[in-house]
Image (cartoon, grey):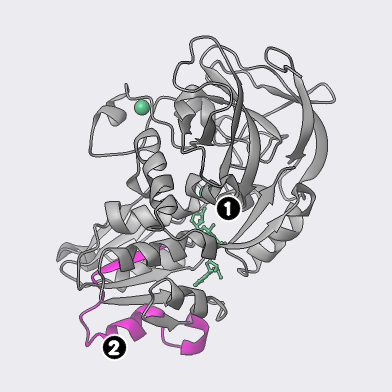
């Protein structure tokens, strides 16, 4: 049946209220307007940023419910709006929560990968024309991170999409939409980990584990993987970690104290915070070499969270920096990461703990709350 130009009725997971589980609803997805693309979502994996929103910890003041979460998806273009030339119906695509307009000051610069074009509407859960394409029982439903891929169909801006190799398995490469790129690129692009260096990664979800993988790919000699869940040691070592530390096993000594002791007071060359917690951000910073250590913050905290550090700890040259989407420009780099997976240069399979149905996603988020699983991939039929 040709659905182009008509609303599509389908299933989606809707967050009606913060701090409540997702509800499984029948929604209507309007056709794409000019410059927009409607996608049949094939797979979408769970990310902690979705969970931050469910738990009311992220952007609560800026965002409105009801909304459709999901920003780590992959699918097939169903139809395109007027003026869209980059993709057409049938193309395999990954939606990009970090768009690439190629026109804004940031996109034109090689100093950043963070496009500013859609920031305000995207943060407000709206399409660029300040409206939404979703309704549920006649009620407006908002978008999330320009993706909303916990839905069988979604509409995104054509700035927020990239075409990928049609041979790539969508239920695997969906993780490139956020977790893998964010961690891997933090090590390769943002920190520029050097050969023979020492690294420490705090938090071993998909983001931290892919940072471990990035440190290994960059030739780091020592990679200390840190998590309060001892079960993460095995997978971290498989991906390249040389050591595992559980802060809970260290008694009264803070982890940065132990790391400094173990490195003869030197500290680590490159540290990564992949949890989203101000206390572990401080630990990652103080674990760095005091002259040239680089601490890269990847985890996301609530918007009002501040980070206080001793000024003298930075004056000798320690650096504190952030990394968004691993420094990758979405349209330019995501298709290349998919090719790396196809060429067996990038491991994704080990990050996927389970495949689930959409209706099982609340349970998957429960296990993520307990720090148990890396990624649960929802496969739409
Ligand atoms: N010390 C060490 N590890 C911790 C701590 C802590 N205090 N608190 C949590 N962890 C571990 C958990 O046990 C889990 O293994 O951090 C890991 C976080 O993994 P996920 O919940 O799977 O999160 P992930 O999707 O990888 O995202 C991590 O990056 O993009 C951001 O918003 C995202 O802030 C989140 C972070
Ligand atoms: Zn831009
Ligand atoms: Zn994410």
Residue 11, by quadrant, is top right
Query: In what quadrant of the picture does the N terminus appear?
Result: top right
Q: Residue at x 77, y 49 (%)?
A: 20
Q: Residue at x 50, y 88 (%)?
A: 249
Q: Is residue 199 above or below residue 254?
A: above
For this view, does 233 lie left or right of residue 68? left
Choose mark 2 or mark 1, whichever is in front: 1
Residue 276 appears in view: no
Residue that numbered label 2 is attached to: 261
Query: In what quadrant of the picture does the C terminus appear?
Result: top right
- Please tell me the numbered disc located at residue 47: 1
Tell me which segment is drawn in magenta.
Answer: 247-273
Q: How many marks?
A: 2
Residue 173 location in percent, x, y?
A: 52, 48
65 or 160: nearer the viewer: 160
Q: Residue at x 65, y 49 (%)?
A: 56
């Amino acid at each position: 049946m040709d659905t182009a130009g008509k609303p599509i009725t389908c299933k989606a997971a809707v967050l009606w209220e913060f701090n409540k589980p997702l509800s499984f609803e029948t929604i209507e997805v309007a056709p794409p307007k000019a410059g927009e693309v409607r996608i049949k979502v094939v797979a979408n994996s769970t990310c902690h940023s979705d969970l931050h929103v469910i738990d009311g910890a992220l952007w609560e003041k800026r965002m409105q419910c009801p909304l459709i979460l999901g920003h780590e998806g992959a699918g097939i273009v169903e139809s395109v709006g007027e003026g869209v030339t980059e993709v057409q119906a049938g193309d395999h695509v990954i939606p990009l929560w970090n768009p690439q307009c190629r026109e804004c000051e940031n996109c034109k610069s090689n100093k950043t990968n963070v496009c500013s074009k859609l920031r305000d509407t995207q943060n407000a859960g709206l399409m660029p024309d300040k409206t939404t394409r979703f309704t549920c029982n006649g009620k407006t439903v908002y978008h999330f991170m320009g993706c909303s891929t916990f839905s069988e169909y979604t509409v995104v801006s054509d700035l927020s999409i990239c075409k990928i190799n049609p041979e790539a398995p969508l239920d695997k490469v969906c993780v490139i939409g956020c977790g893998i790129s964010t961690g891997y690129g933090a090590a390769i692009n943002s920190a520029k980990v050097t050969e023979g260096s020492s690294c420490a990664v705090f938090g071993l979800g998909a983001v931290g584990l892919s940072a471990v993988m990035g440190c290994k790919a960059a030739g780091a000699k020592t990679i200390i993987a840190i998590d309060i869940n001892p079960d993460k040691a095995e997978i971290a070592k498989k991906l390249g970690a040389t050591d595992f530390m559980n802060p809970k096993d260290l008694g009264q000594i803070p982890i940065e104290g132990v790391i400094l002791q173990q490195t003869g007071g030197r500290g680590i060359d490159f540290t990564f915070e992949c949890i989203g917690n101000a206390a572990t951000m401080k630990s990652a910073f103080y674990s760095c070499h005091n002259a040239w250590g680089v601490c890269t913050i990847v985890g996301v905290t609530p918007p009002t969270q501040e980070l206080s550090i001793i000024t003298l700890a930075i004056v000798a040259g320690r650096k504190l920096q952030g990394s968004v989407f691993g420094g990758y420009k979405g349209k330019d780099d995501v298709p290349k990461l998919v090719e790396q997976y196809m060429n067996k240069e990038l491991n994704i399979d080990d990050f996927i703990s389970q495949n689930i149905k959409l209706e099982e996603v609340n349970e998957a988020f429960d296990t993520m709350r307990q720090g148990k699983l890396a990624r649960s991939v929802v496969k739409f039929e």
